[in-house]
Amino acid sequence: MSSSPRESSETEAPDVSAVGSRASLQVVLRSLTAKAVVLVLGGAATLLSARSVVETLGIAGYALVALVSTLPTLLAVCDLGVGAAVIDAFSSRDREHMLRTITAGARTLLCAGSAIAVCGVLTAVSGATDSLLDSASGADVASCIAVVAVLFGCSLPLSLGGSVLAGLGRYHFAVLLQGAGTVLALTVVLLGAAYNAPPAVFVASVLVGQCAAGAASLLLAGRMLSLRLLRVVLFPLRRSPGTRIMQLAGPMAVIKVTSAVAYGADRLVLSSVAHPVAVAVYSAGAQLYAPASALVAAAALPLWRMFSRHRRTSPQAPRRQLLQLTAYFTAGGLAISVLLVTAGPTVANWMLHDRAAVGPGLMAAFSALLLTHAVNYPVAMWFSDPAGLRFQAVRASLMAVVNLAVSIPLAYFMGPAGPVLASAGAHFLCVTVPCHRRVFSRRGRAA
């Protein structure tokens, strides 16, 4: 791939860029603070939810709920990259272009959501679920998959709310609403445990919270824009104008799909080559990793909007700011990793009622995965233009292939920690190193 124009000069971007401004840092801090607050609430809710599921359904039932809940990550992955186009459209400050992009994205996500819902229900009715989930069988599997498919299909267009708020520079509001969705999910779980509900109720809890948070985000963003945004997203009629979004949404969808397949396949690999308890152990560790990873991601997302505006004034990579941000994210990732390794096993074992052991080795593997992402986030946010996203998409595809190939033998020999180490190594070698070389190497400066 040829070098992009921003890499053709040896000069640094000026320090007066939006990236280095105090206002820009305040946006990042607002998002980080909101996510930290939500993590405290969401972390407690997640632990209580998992403990309630284990107490009600047992380890095998918890493994089933965790396994089926992972399937959406293998199907479409959140917003199919449409959010990237929406955030970029807001950097243009052209109201008509914003509305056209939102309309086009809503059409795409409605079609995808409908297709996923229909395919999921047909899969459940056909009885193909037993061959898909070898370690999870019984009448509950089909109902769980049908519920997940329908609710996930509904959540796709609603997920645009968070992207619109991010484009408005109000992503911290979306984060807070996600926290409210987590509380709603916990309420569903506790009610299900109180009435001995079937596994499908517990599987539905998270997606119900996501749908509610997405709808609330659309209502809030619509009020800020003085638009009936929820109606625009749910009923994007053909007479409404749209715009082409694939130059950004296409590569971003590839990045998200390949990454989610790589990480989501871990449970499927374990269910095939290891004992079912290994899935429960992995899932317990993953439930601690997920909020920690989300905290780092929430701090990084506002950089997308800032870098997009920076490119409109200067195409040169702000290497000094990228180095500073990489150092900050690395330090933050190390601090979170230490916390995961020291406190993670105790919390995870409490969550599983000590019926399965989660050791420091598994949490160290998750810490390594977290650190590889934290180091790469600032540079990844800079590569948010079409050329940069295509570059990342190729590397993410390679990462998924390497990860899956290495995960299978490591899962067999190392158990739950194996696939996590495979993910960390594949991401570092296939994504982190190439992205940093493209920005910081001498060739990147003089190409």
Image: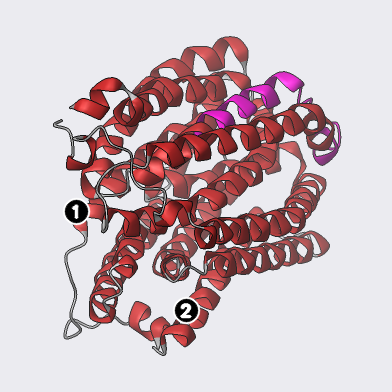
Question: With 405 as the anchor, is 31 left or right in this view?
Answer: right
Magenta: main secondary structure: helix
Quarter that holds the C terminus: top left
At label 1, counting other C-alpha atoms closer than 10 Å, the crowd grade (few under 14, some 14-19, many 20 or more) is some
Q: Position of residue 368 (x, y in %)?
A: 59, 24
Can you tell which mark lies on residue 74?
Answer: none
Residue nearest the observer in this picture, 113 or 86: 86
The reply to whether residue 265 is in sight is yes
The stretch in magenta equals 349-373
Residue located beneath label 2 in the image: 221
Q: Residue at x 33, y 39 (%)?
A: 12
**Residue 352 on the magenta span:** yes
- Tell which residue pokes out farthest to the left in this image: 2
**Residue 399 on the magenta span:** no
Q: Position of residue 15 (x, y in %)?
A: 41, 48
Q: Residue at x 74, y 51 (%)?
A: 43
The reply to whether residue 78 is in sight is no
Residue nearest the observer in this picture, 82 or 335: 335
Question: With 287 as the anchor, is 94 left or right in this view?
Answer: left
At label 2, counting other C-alpha atoms closer than 10 Å, the crowd grade (few under 14, some 14-19, many 20 or more) is many
The Cα–Cα distance between marks 1 and 2, rounded to whole angstroms, is 25 Å
Callout 2 amino acid: Ala
Q: Residue at x 48, y 45 (%)?
A: 71
- Tell which residue pokes out farthest to the top in this image: 413
Residue located beneath label 1 in the image: 247
Q: Position of residue 283 (x, y in %)?
A: 65, 36
